[in-house]
């Protein structure tokens, strides 16, 4: 029985159901014990307030535990989504190596090793063209001996690329001069290439210039020579178990934490290198990927389209290219205009079929499965967020009810302390 003149009211909500009948069903022995009752046998106001506050505190603790369950579930689902993003990006990079883009078609046959030799030989007035000619024709072996000692090759011949569009993009980025650069192990091997007179002018009758003259050619302008021993190599980790010893570079991320769409990989990892050049090309044991190609490309990113590349600007640090001709040489420096296929006369060759690994159709199947799983995970995250938000709302309403109880009664101080313990991490 309610104390005389005391009107009790309880709030209800879609998520909090209170039963005044249940609260008031007390043991008759407890209510008839005398001491502090009103109107003969009823609960005193202080006793009822203590009972009600204990019930509310218990409810708050249970709701706090439920909120923690929702938070833990959300944390788990988000970690699963991040793992799926990682798997999708890695598979996307793998597909990029197998990919034959339909975005931009280049009218050209597949470039094999012999075609690359022919392309270089057509550069008749280049150092690479002269050396390739005398080597292929075994011309003046005594004369060329000093100049070929320690030579590794021409940049264009030392790497291969699976896709013609990617080959064109990387060749456009490097330019003909870099594609025709001569690669030597050390500077000692480079010194015999050129001689100078007393005034420091190039001796056109000696070394490689004399060799060119002997076959009726002239090396025009300057040419690049790369000394592997003098390059600063990549010293980080490599992808475990990868026979091509690709570099373990961190995947780019946008400011919101998402991976950029259309990212196919890093140029340095999309180059296929002959196994003979993967290890111990230099005296320190480095191969061509961590010396030559890391020096040429650094962390140059490759994207499927120009739109993808531009949208990824916030996470591009060392430049980027796209399969449809977009080029960012470094942060803030863009190459614009239509692609001139004839502008770069030397491109990377395509590996033979036996060198190309993986199945594109199988990769597509795996990609579809990963994307479906990610969609389901995103739906689970939305549902978990709704449940968490509802639980927080209910906790807030219950906390308000508890505070009113404290303000309208003489509840002991320790009750309010317990409330703070329960709600400190949730309010």
Image: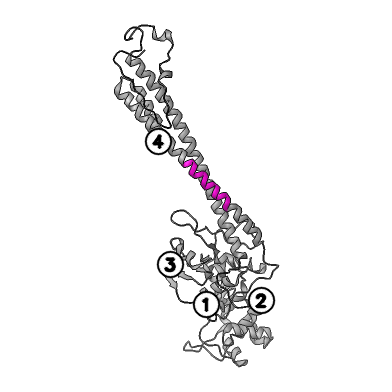
Cα separation between marks 1 and 3? 19 Å
Earlier in the chain: of badge 1 and badge 3, it is 1
Within 10 Å of disc 3 (Cα), the crowding (few <14, some 14-19, many 20+) is some
In this rendering, is residue 77 above or below 69?
below
Q: Which span is picked out in magenta?
A: 371-385
Task: Indicate whether residue 99 is drawn in magenta.
Answer: no
Within 10 Å of disc 4 (Cα), the crowding (few <14, some 14-19, many 20+) is few
Find disc 4 in the rendering and name its residue: 393
- 399 left or right, relative to 297: left
Q: At numbered mark 2, what does the secondary structure look like: helix, strand or loop?
A: helix
Earlier in the chain: of badge 4 and badge 1, it is 1
For the residues carrying marks 4 and 3, which lies nearer the camera in this image?
Answer: 4
Within 10 Å of disc 1 (Cα), the crowding (few <14, some 14-19, many 20+) is some
Earlier in the chain: of badge 2 and badge 1, it is 2
In the image, farthest residue toward the right: 354
Q: Nearer the viewer, residue 27 or 67?
A: 27
Q: At numbered mark 3, what does the secondary structure look like: helix, strand or loop?
A: loop
What quarter of the picture does the N terminus occupy? Answer: top left
Q: At numbered mark 4, what does the secondary structure look like: helix, strand or loop?
A: helix
Find disc 1 in the rendering and name its residue: 175
Find disc 2 in the rendering and name its residue: 113
For the residues labelled 1 and 3, say whether their Cβ atoms are less than 8 Å apart: no
Regarding residue 410, the answer to whether it shows in the image is yes
Earlier in the chain: of badge 4 and badge 3, it is 3
Q: What's the residue at 53%, 66% (across, down)?
A: 302
Q: Nearer the viewer, residue 50 or 197?
A: 50
Q: What's the residue at 48%, 37% (across, down)?
A: 70
Cα separation between marks 2 and 1? 19 Å
Regarding residue 318, the answer to whether it shows in the image is no
Find disc 3 in the rendering and name its residue: 331
């Amino acid at each position: 029985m309610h104390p005389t003149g005391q009107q009790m009211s309880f709030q209800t909500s879609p998520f909090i159901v209170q039963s005044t009948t249940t609260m008031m069903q007390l043991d008759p022995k407890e209510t008839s014990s005398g001491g502090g009752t009103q109107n003969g046998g009823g609960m005193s106001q202080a006793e009822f307030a203590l009972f009600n506050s204990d019930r509310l505190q218990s409810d708050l603790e249970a709701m706090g535990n439920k909120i923690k369950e929702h938070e833990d579930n959300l944390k788990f689902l988000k970690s699963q989504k991040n793992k799926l993003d990682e798997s999708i990006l890695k598979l996307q990079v793998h597909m990029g190596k197998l990919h034959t883009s339909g975005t931009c078609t280049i009218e050209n046959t597949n470039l094999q090793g012999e075609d690359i030799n022919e392309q270089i030989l057509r550069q008749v007035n280049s150092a690479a063209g002269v050396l390739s000619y005398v080597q292929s024709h075994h011309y003046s072996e005594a004369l060329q001996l000093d100049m070929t000692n320690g030579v590794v090759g021409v940049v264009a011949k030392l790497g291969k690329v699976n896709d013609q569009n990617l080959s064109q993009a990387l060749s456009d980025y490097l330019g003909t001069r870099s594609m025709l650069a001569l690669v030597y192990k050390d500077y000692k091997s480079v010194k015999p290439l050129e001689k100078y007179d007393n005034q420091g002018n190039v001796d056109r009758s000696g070394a490689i210039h004399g060799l060119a003259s002997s076959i009726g050619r002239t090396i025009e302008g300057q040419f690049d020579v790369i000394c592997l021993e003098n390059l600063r190599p990549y010293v980080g980790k490599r992808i475990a178990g990868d026979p091509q010893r690709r570099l373990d570079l961190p995947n780019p991320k946008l400011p919101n934490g998402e991976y950029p769409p259309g990212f196919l990989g890093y140029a340095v990892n999309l180059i296929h290198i002959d196994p003979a050049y993967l290890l111990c090309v230099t005296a320190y044991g480095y191969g061509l990927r961590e010396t030559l190609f890391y020096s040429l490309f650094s962390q140059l990113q490759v994207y499927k389209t120009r739109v993808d590349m531009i949208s990824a600007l916030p996470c591009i640090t060392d430049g980027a290219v796209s399969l449809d001709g977009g080029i960012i040489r470094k942060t803030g420096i863009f190459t614009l205009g239509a692609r001139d296929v004839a502008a770069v006369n030397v491109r990377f060759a395509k590996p033979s079929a036996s060198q190309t690994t993986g199945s594109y159709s199988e990769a597509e199947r795996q990609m579809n499965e990963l994307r479906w799983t990610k969609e389901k995970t995103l739906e689970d995250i939305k549902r978990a967020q709704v449940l968490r938000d509802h639980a927080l709302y209910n906790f807030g309403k219950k906390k308000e009810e508890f505070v009113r109880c404290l303000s309208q009664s003489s509840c002991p101080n320790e009750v309010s302390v317990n409330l703070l313990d329960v709600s400190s991490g949730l309010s």
